[in-house]
């Protein structure tokens, strides 16, 4: 992942506090971004995830990076994903034209949780408007739902799935609250594996033909969450444990391994990790 804002974020959401930005590669100006992406491509990486901190209105500074993204596409074969943040149609259309392959967007289903955790002065209707903009721009969209975003409580997740089901999305990624040290949520109890599996079941029932993934942002080492997610109908899983592989085999599922973000739609897979 590359942050186009370095470690700067005006929102400092309660579950992240800008800490994740510090762990990312920084490409905070267009020339630096181009150089770093070309270097990553030469090292054999399949793709990049462009992310960053948000303005107080939940947006990222895409405009000044659009020519750089187009240049990266011209010079490399990298699959380009973006964490879109809240986005207007014009930016979405120009990003699509520049060669962005897909947009990832967090979908929250409860106004109060959104305002409390993300520190925004508006409701989740703004997320729906952004999804409409991405759809109108024909930019493939992969919504992410964070189970337990309200300090570990399951709150608006089913409403988030309802919002998502209105759109022809490429895939839905379910993740779960991580207790990041140094954030206001470091002592929150993350949701139980069964609660996460329940949300996956709801997603599978509501969107029977949509690929569903259990993403990387979740309580690590919780193999019960992984095995229940497979029982509930996920098609993909980031960082699966041996228990998860065994459960998939138990169900007779074909297993493919891919060294990319779980949201990547292009097939880079093989029959092993090698």
Image (cartoon, grey):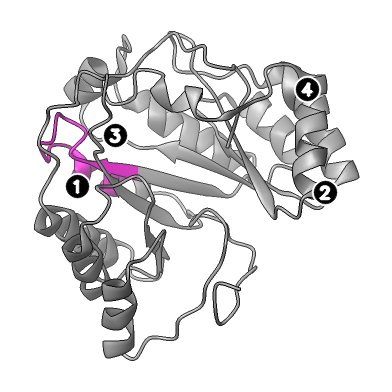
Q: Establish if 60 lies above or below 95.
A: above
Distance CA(mark 4)–CA(mark 2) = 16 Å
Which of the labelled discs sits on residue 14, or is there none? none
Q: Quadrant of the N terminus?
A: top right
Q: Earlier in the sequence, mark 3 or mark 4?
A: 4
Residue contact between numbered discs 1 and 4, judged by CB atoms under 8 Å: no
Q: Is residue 252 magenta?
A: no
**Residue identifier under label 1:** 158
- Between disc 1 and disc 2, the foreground one is 2
11 vs 158, left or right, is right
Task: Tally the numbered discs.
Answer: 4
Residue 165 visible to an observer of this rendering: no
Q: Which image quadrant is residue 123 in? A: top left
On residue 32, the disc is: 4
x 75%, y 55%: residue:
44
Residue that label 3 marks: 108
* Disc 4 residue crowd, few under 14, some 14–19, many 20+, Cα 10 Å: few
Residue 228 drawn above or below residue 94: below
Contact, mark 4 vs mark 2 (Cβ under 8 Å): no
Quarter of image, res 267: bottom right
Decide which of 114, 54 is in the foreground and name it: 54
How far, Cα to Cα, is label 3 from label 4? 33 Å
Give the mark toward the camera: 2 or 3.
Answer: 2
Q: CA distance from mark 2 to mark 3?
A: 37 Å
Q: Check disc 2 and report the residue beneath it.
A: 42
Residue drawn at 29 percent across, 73 percent down:
244
């Amino acid at each position: 992942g590359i942050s186009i804002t370095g470690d700067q974020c005006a929102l400092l959401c309660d579950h992240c506090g800008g800490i994740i930005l510090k762990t990312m590669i920084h490409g905070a100006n267009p020339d630096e971004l181009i150089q770093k992406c070309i270097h990553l491509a030469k090292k054999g990486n399949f793709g990049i995830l462009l992310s960053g901190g948000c303005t107080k209105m939940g947006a990222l500074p895409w405009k000044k990076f659009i020519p750089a993204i187009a240049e990266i596409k011209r010079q490399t074969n990298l699959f380009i994903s973006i964490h879109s943040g809240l986005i207007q149609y014009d930016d979405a259309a120009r990003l699509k034209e520049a060669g962005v392959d897909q947009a990832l967007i967090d979908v929250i289903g409860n106004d109060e949780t959104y305002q409390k955790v993300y520190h925004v002065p508006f409701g989740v209707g703004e997320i729906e408007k952004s999804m409409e903009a991405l759809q109108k721009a024909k930019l493939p969209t992969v919504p992410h739902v964070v189970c337990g975003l309200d300090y570990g409580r399951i709150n608006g997740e089913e409403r988030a799935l309802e919002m998502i089901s209105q759109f022809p999305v490429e895939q839905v990624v379910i993740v779960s609250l991580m207790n990041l040290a140094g954030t206001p949520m470091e002592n929150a109890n993350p949701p139980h594996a069964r609660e996460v599996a329940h949300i996956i079941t709801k997603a599978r029932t509501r969107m029977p033909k949509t690929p569903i993934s259990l993403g990387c942002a979740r309580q690590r080492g919780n193999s019960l969450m992984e095995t229940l997610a497979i029982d509930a109908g996920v098609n993909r899983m980031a960082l699966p444990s041996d228990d998860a592989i065994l459960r998939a085999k138990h169900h007779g599922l074909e297993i493919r391994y891919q060294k990319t973000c779980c949201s990547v739609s292009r097939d880079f897979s093989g029959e092993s990790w090698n």
